[in-house]
Amino acid sequence: MVGAAASSVQDPVEALEAGDAAAASALGPRSDSEARAFPADVADNARDLRLRDISARYVDEVGAVGQDGSPVRGNRPVPGPSKDSTGSRRTPR
């Protein structure tokens, strides 16, 4: 699910880069007009400021997540489990 959460930041980024208030507004729940108005206002501001090359990434309690869904510490991916000399899987600390 972390990979899905990480990819979910792409829709708002695309809406902001395009300055598309309607697309940004659609990201909020239909039942909450304030939650729909805020991202639309941000998209309008991004358009007015001519922001380009906007980026975002998902971060949770564990840390950041790379585009492939793998955990990242600092700017380096965290190594996954590896096998020791006996063939047992171990997780790096």
Image (spheres, helix red, strand yellow):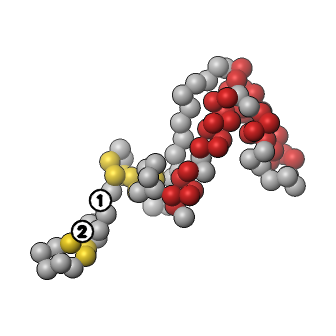
Q: Nearer the viewer, residue 14 or 31?
A: 14
Q: Nearer the viewer, residue 24 or 32?
A: 24
Q: Which residue is mark 2?
A: 82
Q: Position of residue 57 (x, y in %)?
A: 52, 45
Q: Which image quadrant: the N terminus?
A: bottom right
Q: Which residue is mark 1?
A: 79
- Residue at 21 percent across and 79 percent down: it is 88
In this rendering, the answer to whether 48 lies above or below 42 is above
Tell me, yes or no, if residue 38 can be seen here. no
Looking at numbered disc 2 in the image, what kind of residue is underneath it? Ser
- For label 2, count other residues whose C-alpha is less than 10 Å away and answer few (under 14), some (14-19) or many (20+): few
The image quadrant that residue 12 belongs to is top right
Q: Position of residue 52 (x, y in %)?
A: 58, 24
In this rendering, the answer to whether 81 lies above or below 72 is below
Asked if the residues shown at circle 2 and circle 1 are in contact, with their CB atoms under 8 angstroms apart, the answer is: yes
Q: Position of residue 41 (x, y in %)?
A: 77, 33
- Residue at 40 percent across and 57 percent down: it is 71
In this rendering, the answer to whether 15 lies above or below 2 is above
- Residue at 56 percent across and 51 percent down: it is 7
- Residue at 85 percent across and 52 percent down: it is 30
SS for tag 2? Answer: strand
Q: Is 3 situated left or right of 74 in this image?
A: right
In this rendering, the answer to whether 58 lies above or below 37 is below
